[in-house]
Amino acid sequence: MTKIELTVDGAAVSDDVEPRMLLVQYLREELGKTGTVIGCDTSNCGACTVHLDGTSVKSCNVLAVQANGRTVTTIEGLADAAEGELHPVQEAFRECHGLQCGFCTPGMIMQAVDLLAENPHPSEEEVRLGMEGNLCRCTGYQNIVRSVLHAAEGGARA
Amino acid sequence: MTATQERGSGEIGKARRRKEDERLITGRTRWTDNITLPGMLHLAMVRSPFAHAKILGIDTSAAQAAPNVVAVLTGADIADSQGVIINAWPISPDQVSPTHLPMPADRASFAGEIVAVVAARSAAAARDAAELVDVDWEELPAALDMKEAAAADADHGVLAHPDLGTNKSATWKFDSGEAGTGGNVDDEIAKARESGIVIEREYRQQRLIPAFMEPRSTVVDPTGEQITMWSATQIPHILRFALAATTGVPESKIRVVAPDVGGGFGGKLQTTPEEFITFAVARRLGKPAKYTETRSESLLACHHGRDQWQKLTLAAEKDGTVTGLKVELLTDLGSYNAILGGGTPVLGAFMFNAIYKFKAYQFNLQTVLTNKTWTDAYRGAGRPEATFAIERLMDELAAELGVDPLEIRKKNWINADEFPFTSVCGLEYDSGDYDAATERAKEMIGYDALRAEQKARRDRGDRVQLGIGVSTFTEMCGLAPSRVLGSLDYGAGGWEHASVRMLSTGTVELVTGTSAHGQGHETVFSQIVADRLGVPFEDVEVLHGDTQVAHKGLDTYGSRSLVVGGEAVVRAVDKVIEKAKPIAAHLLEASVDDVEFSGGRFSVRGTDQGKTIQEVALATFTAHSYPDDIEPYIDAEATYDPVNFNYPHGTHLCAVEVDTETGAVALRQYACCDDIGNIMNPLIVEGQVHGGVTQGIAQALWEEAVYDDNGTLVSGSFVDYLLPTSADTINYDVDHTTSPAIANSLGAKGVGEAGTIASTPAVVNAVVDAVRHLGVNDIQMPCTPERVWRAIHANDGDAPTPADAMPHFEEGALNQDEGAGQ
């Protein structure tokens, strides 16, 4: 077991973990952060996407021990849900019907936030390429792309 | 046709943002795998690596001794309690079907079948120990190719289940001459051979994997009076029935909950070995147990879809008027008859004739057992296969006559003034206007301009050619009139149930027997209740997917939830109003005959006196004053059994560019005009169309479950099974015409499967259209660059590669990079 200390969704956490434990398993099983989900076992689907020090990573592709001393943000920490707040990207997904079953959605939103941080005014093509690592089986992506573009426009107005 | 429904508060038809989204976008979700119970054990499965093998013995001692392992069980250990996986639709009385035990003890009949289970304190410990289970296998020859399997018998070839003596499971036939719904197809084909046109083709429906995003997961808690199973399923009610019917546990002792479910597409329309094994292990150990599959396990063992060979003969007169259609299908069941099993292709049996006026039709089905993963319903279930076949054939007929593919369709389709129309299968199509939808779709995509560009590019001999694909589809949806299902030997009915609970404070609980997994029932059913009952949209709570709450229901599949379940909602609401009326009259001191209900309020005709439905609900709760002859109760329930299917239709047009040098296909434009009757929520409909169209395109271009010669699934991960990404897809142009359904009071038709049914042939027709002038008339799906390239070059002759083009590595040879080797 290895001791890790990190910040997750604004809270300092500390645990002894097996060195082989994946970050996504740590988030779900030890911290109860079940908003982040596991959709595959080959790092293709992106359902487990979170931010590590502000950049999107597939948390099935990071060991919990690699997150030691770092800051993780999950879908649950993106906005202050207790205050009823939504991040503009969350709001955009609802507004544009960017989700159906919602299983891929946390990962999609975390990836979209990262994409817009890097490129606040992307073209449709840039959104399509930037979201390529996240799979969705319900929407055909059209409304996901629309959601991301909608959030980008909202950001521009603000 | 005009809409006849009453518009209440205007909720119906509004693009309401979805109620269910707030939880989903904030991660406040209840996926089955999120559930953790005190003392819960985690399960890992030991699966057969062989397509067909005898189990000579299983040594569980090392696994048993591993740290934190509680139990290791084999099929023999739970033989008496594990139940049986059911086939609800034996399509013929003499169907040959192997018994499907959740965990067989003697033999595995596909790669991925479960033969042992480990229960441990953690998922990691269970998985580690599963590696230590030592199975002594004797590999057997495997039946893998569907056609070879169909030809095999006890003496020749390989049998998937040697004890059965055959791989042929069942046959199913429909003949319009015998049924009295049309003529004799062989006569029409003979006539056409003489003096008309006969198109004969064989098409392949490749094997697909539903690939819902949430892997299946099951949690069983045996510690209460009712054993509770949470499962990622589309069919909690049917699952409870199957558990009770085969394990000996009374139905009243079982509660099944489908919490948040992450997609299904038919893939979770199944009762699975994993669910039954988890149930058995939890009962045996007396502890809650959870099993969550990995994605690789999901692709390997969740049922697959499609997998048919379609032999088709279309007869037409010289002018292109279609007369007869004969269909001979071979379907690969995999190693078991799944819950629908051979019923899935039967669901397509009445749809090959589609929107066309055939005189004679015959459908012949042979289902075949092999040593592959079982197959069953996948989005569209039988109807995509039928639509693909007929829409490909209509293009071939157009090519034969040298006319535009839309022209040949128009010549043969049912005209708007002919509805309701009885098809050559005897089905009564409710409503439609194929011409209107087609004209709109043509306008949307710029059809004439595309044809002109196509001609110019052909004339120029461009490397990249343009193809335009057409699909004018219909489908039967809204499963289903129970009597029809009974006549087809299906084991259950097709009704749906709803109940409305009027709470004391004026809010409403709507309980539905449908079980949503992404469709948006909570939103749409709230709109229906709000409209009809005159209560605010926000005040309606939709409850579903828990047999303890929604005790009656037949779940969600076959585009049935709105058109069957929604109609049950309408009827339950109407009963509430009827029951509340005498109480309102009593409170208003008026005669019931003078009270009318509108916009959520009972009022006395000719006065300004009234009581809202919420006020009546409160008065009913307190029960201080109500008429003597009734009970103080206005909640109501309704069970609706549809009298007919409904028949959405539409025209889908697709433009693709095909690089004739590389075979690469690029989607350029996609436009569709679907007629799904009255639309409850345009936003949700749009989402269903987008997703459906994408899955259909994926069959045409990308997806295929591939097995190697040993029966190993080689497309067994998301690295190898090609789900489309945002970078592969394009934006679709979606519009609608409206011919309301006549079988339900909402005027609504199903939309969940329409896009998938329509889009596959539109895309393949486009690809073939792009290269037809190069001598191509078919390309097998998925139309990969290699297949397209090979089709283009199939007629080049068997010219060997010139010797001087190789080898590349000899000095002075051709194709050497400048300075290579230095």
Image: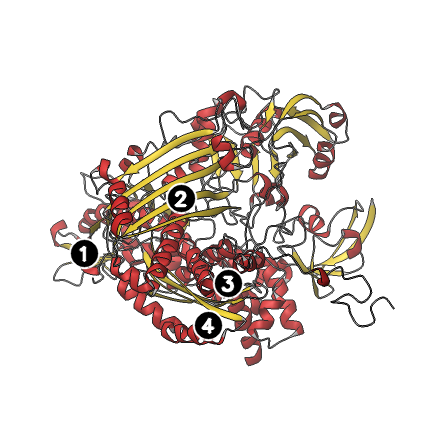
User: Which secondary structure, mark 4?
Assistant: helix
Q: Amino acid at mark 3?
A: Gly
Q: Position of residue B573 (x, y in %)?
A: 28, 49
| Label 4–label 3 contact, CB within 8 A | no
Residue B550 visible, this angle: no
Q: Chain of mark 4?
A: B
Disc 1 designates what residue? B418
- Residue kind at label 1, given as amino acid type: Glu
- Front-most of residues A143 and B612: A143
Q: Is residue A65 above or below residue B237?
A: below
Q: Chain of mark 1?
A: B
- Horizontal and vertical percent position of residue B584: 21, 51
Q: Secondary structure at mark 3?
A: loop
Tell me: residue B536, above or below residue B254. below
Residue that lies at the very extreme toward the bottom in this rendered image: A157
Q: Residues within 10 Å of mark 3 (few under 14, many from 20)?
A: many
Q: Nearer the viewer, mark 2 or mark 4?
A: 4
How many labels, in total? 4
The numbered mark at residue B458 is 4
Residue A98 circle label? 3
Q: Which mark is residue B311?
A: 2
Q: Which callout, 1 or 4, points at the residue further toward the start of the chain?
A: 1
Of the two numbered discs 1 and 3 in the rendering, the one whose residue sits closer to the viewer: 1
For the C terminus of chain A, the quadrant is bottom right
Rendering coords of residue B650 (x, y %): 33, 60
